[in-house]
Structure formats: C-alpha cells, structure tokens
Image (tube, grey):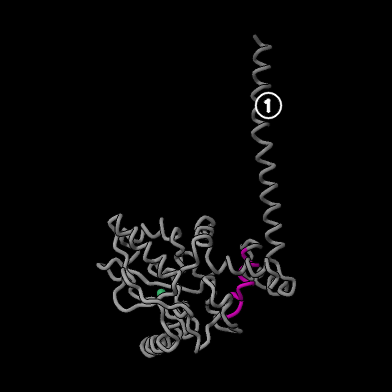
Amino acid sequence: MKKYSIILLLFIVFLILLQGFPKKEEKHQNDMEKNQLLYRFYQKEKEERYQQYKQTHPEMEDIDIITRVNLNLDKPYYEDAEPALYLNTNLVFVNKYHYLEENYEPTSLEKLEKCSSGNRLLQKDAKEDFERLCEQAEKEGKTIRVVSSYRSYSYQKTLYDNYVLKDGKEKADTYSARSGFSEHQTGLVIDVDNAIKSFEDFEETEEFTWMQENAHRFGFILRYPKGKEDITGYQYESWHYRYVGEKVATFLKENNMTFDEYIARDLARQGK
Ligand SMILES: [Zn+2]
C-alpha cells in the first residue's frame, strides 16, 4: 500500500513538473519576443532621450519609453512638428506633432447619403464602410448618426480661434486641435451621436457599446480612448472615430493599442 502511495506521489510530482516546464518555457519565449520588439523599435540616435525619459518615468517599461519618445512625447505638444505621414492613404497620421498643410484637401471626398445630420463629406472608402456600419447598426435597432466629418483647414481655424477667445489658448488646446493638426481634415474621421443624446454623452448610449464591439469590422477605431490620453495627446472622446481600414482596426482592437503606438512602432520597423 505504501509503495503505491509513493508511486502515486511521484506521479503527481511528475504531473506538476510537466505543467511547470512549458510555463517557464513560455515566459522565456515572451521575454525573448519582448526583447526582439524592443530591438525593432529602438532607434540609436534617440538613446539620450530614452535615458532622460526613463529618469522622469522610472516605473515605465522600456517598450513604453521607446514608444513615447519615438512619438516625440518627451517634447511639448506642437514642438518640432513635421508634415503628416502616409499622406493620401487610409493610414495618414495626424496628431499634435504631425500636421496637414493649409491647402491640403483629401482626394476623394464624397457626400454621406445616409446616417448624417446634414451635408457632410468623407473620403470614399470611409464613406462606403461607414454606410455599411450604419445599415448594420440599424438592423440591430441602433441609430448612429454623423454630426461632424471632414473639416477644412479654414473651418478648423475658425473653430479653434473661437475656443481660444472663449477659454484662452491653454484651455482650448486641451480639447480642440489647432488648424492643420485636426484629424478631421483627413476626411477619414467622424463624430457621432445616437440622434437623441448629445455627442458628448455618446458613452452613455447603447450605440456606444455597439460601436465598441463592431466598429473595427467596418474599419473604424475609437481614436482617443480612455486611459491613453498621455499617448494620443487628447482627452477621451467617446464620439470620435477614425477610419484606418478593417485590417489595422482589427489589429489595434485585438492588441488594445492606439493608432499612435501602431505608427510609432511601425516607423521604427521601417527604420525611419
Ligand atoms: Zn472629432
């Protein structure tokens, strides 16, 4: 009887070890992958800035430090701004360090034919996919309506200048983009409501929940998510959706990643 107990005990120990080994292996694998990622995003000429950022953010993981410095987040907003990246593609990148020229107009603007509160324009791919999104939502009893889409440079300038008059420059900068720095000028962005509540309360609607679950299937992402303000440079905006196409939108959703992080790592991958 005792002999069997020992054999049973050994067998249990064996099972535990068997469980433990692959986990250890897996952890090693994760570390390896992380290091490889770091190596890919790391840009030697930014070494000094990485080190400085690490000193002021000692709790932060290396990969996040590299991502933020690659995005210029160690500099004040709008400083050393450069022209927008990937112009005239669905991945055009506009943020507080990348701008569109005053005379830039998207190439394929079309008028939204449905699910819009007025005469509103979007680029062709974004328009077609948004209309599919809206039809599907309608089938499921949800109303999603565009209240703002393409905004020209001069329109954004009027908006921003009015906010500055009202609240002062510092405050206006926290909630409104300066002209040239607004994603709305790309023609790939929509602000939405549910035709009942104000767009600012979109988070409280069941349409918001629907968007959380489905927007990526039609190529849209929540561009300024909660908890990522320090990366996007914008307050959380539950109503602002950006078109990037289904593939990238799905990748970002699955990886809980912002478009900024995607671009920062993508750029590094290409050695820019
Ligand atoms: Zn917006």
Q: Secondary structure at mark 1?
A: helix
Where is ligand 1, by quadrant? Answer: bottom left
- Image location of residue 168, percent across then percent down: 41, 88
- Tell me, yes or no, if residue 226 can be seen here: no
Amino acid type indicated by mark 1 = Phe
Q: Quadrant of residue 46?
A: bottom right
Residue 17 or 204: which is nearer the viewer? Answer: 204
Quadrant in the rendering for residue 214: bottom left
In the rendered image, the vertical position of residue 159 relative to residue 91, given as above or below = below
From the top left corner, tell me how far across and down residue 167 is, in percent.
38, 86
Residue 65 in the magenta stretch? The answer is yes
The residue under the point 33% across, 74% down is 147
Hey, which residue is sitting farthest left in the picture? Answer: 196
Seen as rendered, the residue at the extreme right is 44
Task: Name the residue tied to disc 1.
Answer: 14
Instruction: State which quadrant residue 127 falls in.
Output: bottom left
Q: Is residue 18 magenta?
A: no
Quarter placement of the C terminus: bottom right
The magenta segment is: 64-76
Q: Residue 68, image x and y in percent? A: 61, 70
Q: How many marks are shown on the rendered structure?
A: 1
Position of 135 compared to 44: left or right? left
Residue lying at 54% horizontally and 73% vertically, measured from the top left: 89
Q: Nearer the viewer, residue 9 or 99?
A: 99
User: Looking at the figure, which quarter contains the N terminus?
Assistant: top right
In the image, residue 252 sits, relative to residue 125, either above or below, namely above
Give the image location of residue 105, x and y in percent.
48, 84
